[in-house]
Amino acid sequence: MATAELEDILERHRRDPLQLLQILIELQARDGWLPPATLSALAVALGMPRARVESTASFYSFLHTRPAGEYRILFSDNITDRMLGNMALMQALCDKLWLQPGKVSEDGLVSVATTSCTGMCDQGPALLANGRTVTRLTPERIDEMAHLIRRRVPVGDWPPEWFHVEDNIRRRDVLLDHGLAPGQALAVALDRGAMSILGEIERSALRGRGGAGFGSDIKWRSCRDAWGDAHYVICNADEGEPGTFKDRVLLSSYFDLVVDGMCIAGMAIGANKGFIYLRGEYRYLLDRLETRLAQRREQGLLGRNILGRGFTFDIEIHLGAGAYICGEESALIESLEGKPGKPRIRPPFPVTNGYRGQPTTVNNVETLALAALIAVRGGEWFRAIGTPASTGTKLLSVSGDVERPGIYEFPFGVSVAEVLEAAGARDTQAVTSAGAAGHCLAADEFGRRIAFEDVATGGSIMVFDASRDMFEVARNFAHFFAHESCGFCTPCRVGTAVNARLLDKLAADHGSPYDLDEIVKMHRLMQGASHCGLGNTATIAIDDMLAKFRPAFERRLHSPEYEPAFDLDAALSQARRMTGRDDPGAHLGDNRGALAEERAHAHGRATTTGVQGAPASAEPVSAKDLQP
């Protein structure tokens, strides 16, 4: 990249080292990847070690420190996309383009791989083409896509209907039918004042809608009372949980209510600055959201002296770059500061030491929209909806084996069975209540209620009918978490990888009861020892599936005793072919026999086991012995 271009980008981002991630995203948008020379020049320009720049660039899935092709195609690999045939479509595209999945074509034109859930589970299979979302993939679209790529037609000139994203709102309640004009909630809040608003939030018993369910009034008061040079509001729009897409709909069609909620939170905690952390998969929304923020500034609904009331509050949008862990609030703040998104050690908590070390409140998109609604209608009104411990309504992203996937707004306390009926589910065997990170319910549990005190959820409801293999669902979840673990703590880094390997071992017909026991042990270990919520929730659904759908796992068992995943004798087959040997002496015995042989020698005894067809005293056969 020319020096002048780099300087333009740096000036737009105020040469702020905390803008590193945004600068990298913009640099890659121009070059298609991040060459070493670019990283070095950026490090010098920002006055930071190159290793710091490299660590951020290499942490995020959507940043490439090696050439990734002129066309970068990423198929969404959530379990619901798999159920809709995404793997066959990906292979078809690769076949037409003459390349292997996960590789860059020899001419550097295109790469095809997978990514985690893209938030399009209600209209999949989906993919990202150079960061742009393509929905409702079909074999016909794949054929045409291959043709367009070979002709080097820019992604922006592809058929516009491919990029169409629908809201698919199936049931509305008080939030999705709010009827408020832009800025109306903010005007009411300014009339009431900060302390009155805090009181209404407390009376409403509003709990965070991102999944943790922490009391919003406690978070806001703690942040307001914390000493700092500045206070900040962050809207967590890093909606990465597999199967969830509710925040996407709120940002797309209810953005003014979300912004009103951010402004109200800012007024309540004494902040003048807010950030929306928008997941990279929703980049297609960025221009539209930026335009609306600019319009609000012109209308006096954002920026300096809002509504002529002396209140100043403005918002910046920061893009993520493909990291599920950034949904955790401290990891999000790290990412917002241009670093790898690894969760911080707590305490201190963000409400006292957040963005730039200042008091910061981080709230989910839905939480902020509800706060705006409460500012107008009051806490008591909101508290009368739902259950005593779970007040208000909840947006549910319903996908999978249902006739009507989409967004459903229900008061808390609705049964799982009612949700399934509304969505047109048939012959359902299982439901995951919080994407890959929550419990999995069997059919005899569908009478349970969606509420913090019963079935807690961040909003992702994935439905599996009787035709689905729950082992494959568990395996997909295991690989998701192994990919998304930030690697900060050993229990999560190792545990997620071990789970993925164990399930792969079962799938490869090398499983034994030992492997099932190890999965259970890993669940217990990670729950108690992981650093953040990812490790603590990564095995919940898998453990439930193993307990409730055990036959799906036991069908994969090959031996009643331990069996290794690696077959050394099979690995030597190429050497046997090269040497033209297939006699008993060219084969290795099974591992149990080898172990018995080793133990016998350790005790000075000979055995008749070892190399098949060879005397007990024969030397073991190695790969070296098979060389011609």
Image (cartoon, grey):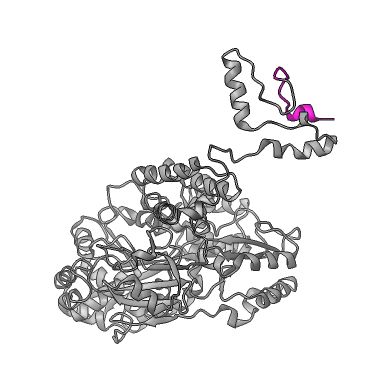
- In the rendered image, residue 455, in percent from the top left (x then y), is placed at 31, 63
Query: Which of the pair 217/42 is nearer the observer?
Result: 217
In the figure, is residue 160 to the left or right of 456? right
Q: Residue furthest top?
A: 604
Query: Which of the pair 47/53 is nearer the observer?
Result: 53
Quarter of the figure that contains the C terminus: top right
Q: Which residues are magenta?
A: 616-628
Does the magenta-highlighted stretch encompass residue 95?
no
Does the magenta-highlighted stretch encompass residue 618?
yes
The answer to whether one can see residue 371 in this image is yes
Quarter of the figure that contains the N terminus: bottom right
> Which residue occupies 46% across, 53% down?
550
Q: Is residue 197 above or below residue 351?
A: below
Number of marks present in the image shown: 0
| Majority SS type along the magenta span | loop
The answer to whether one can see residue 489 in this image is no
- In the rendered image, residue 559, in percent from the top left (x then y), is placed at 56, 41
- In the rendered image, residue 266, in percent from the top left (x then y), is placed at 26, 68
Occupied quadrant, residue 27: bottom right
- In the rendered image, residue 73, in percent from the top left (x then y), is placed at 63, 65
Occupied quadrant, residue 91: bottom right
> Which residue occupies 74% across, 30% down?
623
Q: Is residue 226 above or below residue 204?
A: above
> Which residue occupies 34% across, 55% down?
356
Query: Which of the pair 12/124 is nearer the observer?
Result: 124
> Which residue occupies 43% across, 71% down?
245
In the figure, is residue 59 to the left or right of 597? left
Query: Which of the pair 319/205 is nearer the observer?
Result: 205
